[in-house]
Image: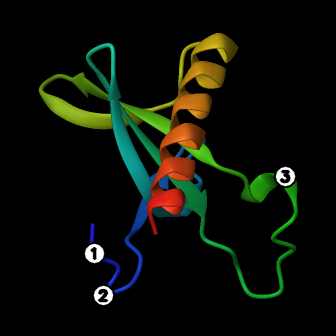
Amino acid sequence: MSEEFGPEFLTVTDEDGNELTLEYVDTLEHNGQTYSAFFPAVEEGADEDDADYGLIILKSIVVDGEELLSTLDSDEELEEIYNLFAEQLYDDEAED
C-alpha cells in the first residue's frame, strides 16, 4: 500500500454508540479469517503513551450479507493474531 497520499482513516461505532476514528495499519489472512490492525487516531493534546492508544485488531465477519468489523472471540485468538501482526510489521520494517 502506498503512503503517497497519507494514512487511511476509518470511523467505527461501538456497541454503545460511541464513534472512534481509527488509522489503518495492515491486514492479514489467517485460517480463512481476515484481520485488520488499526491505531486510534490521536487527538491533539492526548498522551500517545496512554494504553488507549495501542494497536486495535478487528476481524471481518459477515452478518446478513453485510461485512462488519468485530472484536476477537478470545484472549488466545487476540494474542495469536497480535503476534502475527507484530512479526509482519517487523518484517516490513526490516525490508525498508
Q: Quick check: marks 2 and 1 in contact, CB under 8 Å? A: yes
Q: Position of residue 44 (x, y in %)?
A: 74, 87
Identify which amino acid the numbered label 1 is placed on.
Ser
Q: Position of residue 18 (x, y in %)?
A: 59, 54
**38, above or below 61, in the image:** below
Identify which amino acid the numbered label 3 is placed on.
Ala
Residue 90: image tag: none
Compare residues 15 and 51 and report the one nearer the observer. Answer: 51
Compare residues 80 and 23 and report the one nearer the observer. Answer: 80
* Pair 2/3: label in front: 2
Identify which amino acid the numbered label 2 is placed on.
Phe
Please tell me in which quadrant of the rendered image residue 83 appears.
Answer: top right
Say which residue label 1 marks.
2
Secondary structure at numbered mark 1? loop
Say which residue label 2 marks.
5
Label located before the other in sequence (3 or 1): 1
Residue 51: image tag: 3
